[in-house]
């Protein structure tokens, strides 16, 4: 890649970071909360991208891993009085563990069958949550303390949540980028492109596919935990099947395999319903469906693909 | 003992509904190689359409047939417009497109008809009939009758007609089919049309029981998928057997095991899917082998 | 008399790879013509070009009019292509395979139709309810031929019928082919690696080399011409 192109990319990323850092000063408190939510979706999408974009495994049940993380945080906070911040990594680890556990039997399922199994999990999960009332509070759910910036930091709670989401998001994005460039990341992509070829090159599909599930579930768990903290409430309907499907929309529109594209996907998921509701209450679903189909038919690379196209045009030799 | 047989018959009725939708899923899987996650929503849309016809003066059965025709046309249209462009793309792309259809059709249904729960008239009376001293619901028996008839008619179509043979051939070996003059891409569209009609049957049979609302078929799709997987995702007979078995099984479990009533049946459905896919992916009657690397 | 099949400077490619660089040939009605050549010479591609299973350019005329693009339409014109690997439906019964052969004909696949074809291939009648995939190699080739016959084609394209079969079986197949040609008037273009066999069973032959026609002429002469046999046919 030419020096000019690298330079533009670096400047672009730096600009994004600066904007992200100062945004709360320029927007209302309410909008800060919206952007905080975009941040949590962003983290969930990063995870889904590792799984589907990088290692090529289809998951229609990503929301279930978010639920695992969210409920872990909620249970720790409500039943055991743990500080909200400490629950975040724990939620990630528990969800990550669940991902590894699921990743193992999932090895026997490929493509369509995996999609089917994860779809079923997403549909049935709320019922499962209701069943274990003792832990999860059943249908009534768990009520948590309202989020507050830790002592010493003078921020409104929404601004605090914004920086929490995007701070963690930034760290996880950097980790994700490192992962992508690492041997592990290359192995993921090798498996996505051809399992047989990967296996004959010494890359063990079993190991890396399971690892991909674990990593993506870890990310989802953290996102779920943030959702719980931000809304200060979880119940079985906090993570419904529509969430899993929406995450798929986000990752597809942002661009499969593109980490930065996740920002667009996350923004779409958060803001489309808000603005489309002005047309009608059901318009969001219709528009989301149309966008999803349209993107797959016309622009399978998503927004990131479009970006690459424009970039290539601009830098034509 | 009487209750047992009542529950078996009731289970067969649910099973018939699952079997119809499962057969639709299998039909599309065999012809296009894709699992149509939007099958349930398509069925719901068709059911609402039926209600609209009935509200405009048609009685049940004329509305039923009109709806089947509309569903057929709709299925063909969807295959031509949305699926055909992505026919040769990777599995992930097609899965995402069917999810997009799911979201779109669900949204359209709510938009056009609103989200309120509605009553859907049943063509069968709710009086019981007595056989050997046990009271059975005429509605259950009617549902079993309609669903099995639909399934059998389709089976006869596939076995004994030229078009049915061509459809089977197109699904098995598209290249060889073209060489004998079969227009493969229209066969795929035909498959989608038939599947949509089957889904409509399923929807119109279940709506009187569970009441009509835009999310009516979500759980039923899960059971239909479980039935298809249980029977073997590429086996039409398996879908029917799987559906009936699952219906009876879930009903009996729900009646006699207290923890498994209501929504927990969804979890039972999930358990069936996972268990079958992990232990015996080909299902009871299917033939696909899962490749291991 | 116009030829039944005429190819003029036909080109064909598999994606970016060009396989035919301008093939011209003619087949008169009622003839049996052989297409020979080494591996990769373009024999199979030539048949695929006719049936429309590969992207092609140049002129292809059948009974005077240009051939359509898609395989389905070509089949409907009365051209039956039996590909390499036979193209039988392994999961369907023998009878269903035959019924499919008659797909393009109105009223095809009737009992009388089947009876006519069983007369040519008695062994298939015995096995009519068996799954095609369980037949032996020779029987599958018979099935492929029988299926083509069901279509009452004007032109039969046959790709490597002897592949993987024992000599006795191959002899039987070619004898049946001769009968089809004589009794049903089917014009045949047969692609073969076994040049000697093909030359003894055909009236004329074309020898392809690297996507072009290198030699053409009456099969008898080609068989006798040692130089041709040595250079192009390997024996």
Image (cartoon, rainbow, N blue to C red):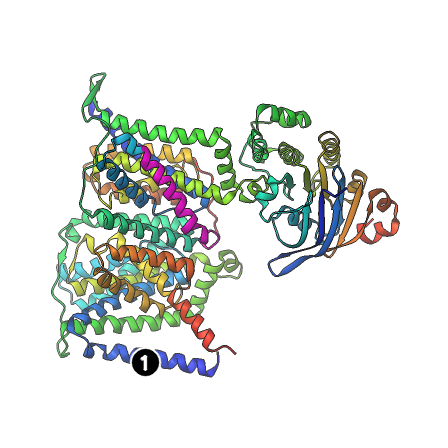
* Residue that numbered label 1 is attached to: A15
Q: Mainly helix, strand or loop, the magenta region? A: helix
Q: Secondary structure at mark 1?
A: helix
Look at the picture and state if B42 lies above or below B9: below
What x and y, as percent, mark residue B221? 31, 43
Say whether residue C115 is left or right of residue A35.
right
Q: Please state the horizontal and vertical placement of residue B219, each as a whole percent of the image.
A: 27, 43
State which region is magenta: B65-90
Quick check: is B67 in the magenta stretch?
A: yes
Q: Residue at x 29, y 44 (%)?
A: B45
Position of B107 relative to A312 (above/below):
above
Q: Is residue A89 above or below residue B271?
A: below
- Observer able to see residue B85: yes
| Residue B233 shows up from this direction | no
- Between residue A95 and residue A224, name the one nearer to us: A224
> Is A190 left, or right, of B127 in this rendering?
right
The verdict on residue B252 being magenta is no
């Amino acid at each position: 890649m030419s020096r000019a192109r690298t330079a533009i990319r670096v400047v672009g990323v730096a600009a994004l970071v600066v904007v992200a850092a100062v945004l709360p000063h320029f927007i209302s408190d309410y909008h800060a909360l919206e952007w905080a939510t975009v941040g949590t979706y962003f983290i969930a999408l990063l995870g889904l991208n590792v799984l589907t974009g990088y290692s090529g495994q289809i998951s229609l049940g990503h929301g279930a891993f978010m639920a695992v993380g969210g409920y872990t945080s909620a249970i720790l906070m409500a039943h055991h009085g743990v500080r909200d911040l400490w629950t975040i990594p724990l939620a990630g680890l528990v969800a990550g563990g669940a991902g590894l556990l699921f990743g193992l039997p999932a090895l026997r399922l490929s493509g369509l069958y995996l999609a089917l199994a994860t779809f079923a999990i997403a549909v049935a999960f709320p019922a499962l949550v209701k069943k274990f009332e003792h832990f999860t509070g059943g249908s009534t759910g768990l009520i948590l303390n309202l989020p507050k910036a830790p002592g010493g930091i003078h921020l409104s709670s929404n601004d605090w949540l914004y920086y929490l989401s995007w701070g963690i998001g930034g760290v996880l994005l950097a980790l994700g980028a490192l992962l992508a460039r690492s041997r592990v990341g290359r192995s993921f992509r090798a498996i996505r492109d051809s399992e047989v070829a990967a296996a004959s090159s010494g890359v063990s599909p079993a190991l890396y596919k399971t690892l991909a599930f674990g990593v993506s579930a870890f990310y989802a768990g953290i996102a779920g935990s943030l959702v719980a903290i931000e809304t200060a409430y979880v119940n079985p309907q906090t993570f419904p099947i529509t969430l899993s499907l929406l995450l798929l929309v986000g990752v597809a529109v942002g661009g499969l395999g593109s980490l930065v594209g996740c920002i667009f996907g996350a923004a779409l998921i958060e803001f489309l319903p808000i603005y489309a509701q002005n047309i009608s209450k059901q318009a969001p679903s219709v528009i989301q469906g149309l966008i999803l189909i349209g993107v797959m038919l016309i622009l399978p690379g998503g927004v990131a693909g479009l970006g690459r196209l424009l970039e290539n045009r601009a830098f034509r030799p | 003992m009487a209750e047992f047989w009542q529950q078996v018959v009731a289970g067969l009725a649910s099973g018939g509904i699952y079997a119809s939708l499962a057969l639709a899923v299998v039909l599309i899987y065999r012809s296009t190689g894709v699992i149509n996650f939007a099958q349930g929503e398509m069925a719901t849309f068709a059911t609402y359409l039926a209600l609209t016809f009935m509200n405009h003066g048609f009685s049940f059965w004329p509305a039923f047939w009109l709806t089947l025709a509309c569903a057929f046309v709709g299925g063909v249209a969807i295959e031509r417009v949305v699926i055909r462009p992505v026919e040769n793309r990777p599995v992930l792309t097609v899965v995402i497109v069917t999810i997009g259809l799911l979201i779109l059709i669900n949204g359209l249904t709510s938009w056009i008809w609103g989200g309120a729960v509605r009553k859907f008239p049943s063509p069968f009376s709710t009086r019981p009939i007595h056989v050997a001293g046990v009271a059975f619901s005429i509605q259950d028996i009617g549902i079993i009758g309609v669903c099995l008839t639909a399934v059998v008619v389709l089976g006869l179509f596939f076995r004994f007609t030229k078009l049915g043979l061509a459809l089977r051939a197109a699904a098995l070996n598209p290249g060889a089919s073209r060489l004998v003059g079969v227009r493969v891409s229209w066969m795929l569209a035909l498959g989608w049309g038939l599947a949509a009609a089957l889904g409509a049957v399923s929807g119109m049979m279940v709506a009187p029981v569970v009441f009509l609302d835009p999310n009516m078929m979500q759980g039923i799709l899960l059971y239909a998928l479980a039935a298809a997987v249980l029977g073997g995702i590429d086996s039409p007979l398996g879908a029917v057997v799987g559906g009936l078995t699952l219906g009876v099984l879930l009903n009996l479990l729900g009646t006699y095991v207290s923890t498994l009533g209501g929504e927990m049946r969804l979890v039972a459905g999930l358990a069936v899917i996972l268990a079958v896919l992990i232990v015996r992916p080909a299902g009871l009657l299917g033939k696909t082998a899962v490749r291991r690397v | 008399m116009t030829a039944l099949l005429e190819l003029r400077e036909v080109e064909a490619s598999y994606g970016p790879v060009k396989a035919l660089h301008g093939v011209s040939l003619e087949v008169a009605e009622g003839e049996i013509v052989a297409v020979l050549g080494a591996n990769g010479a373009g024999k199979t591609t030539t048949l695929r070009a006719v049936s429309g299973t590969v992207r092609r350019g140049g002129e292809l005329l059948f009974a005077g009019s240009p051939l359509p693009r898609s395989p389905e339409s070509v089949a409907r014109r009365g051209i039956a292509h039996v590909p390499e690997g036979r193209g039988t439906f392994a999961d369907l019964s023998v009878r269903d395979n035959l019924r499919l052969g008659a797909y393009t004909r109105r009223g095809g696949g009737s009992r009388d139709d089947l009876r006519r074809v069983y007369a040519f291939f008695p062994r298939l009648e015995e096995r009519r309810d068996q799954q095609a995939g369980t037949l032996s190699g020779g029987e599958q080739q018979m099935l492929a031929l029988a299926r083509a016959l069901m279509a009452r084609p004007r032109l039969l394209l046959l790709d490597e019928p002897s592949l993987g079969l024992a000599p006795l079986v191959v002899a039987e197949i070619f004898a049946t082919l001769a009968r089809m040609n004589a009794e049903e008037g089917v014009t045949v273009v047969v692609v073969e690696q076994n040049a000697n066999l093909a030359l003894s069973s055909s009236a004329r032959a074309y020898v392809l080399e690297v996507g072009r026609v290198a030699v053409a002429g009456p099969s008898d002469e080609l068989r006798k011409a040692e130089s041709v046999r040595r250079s192009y046919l390997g024996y």
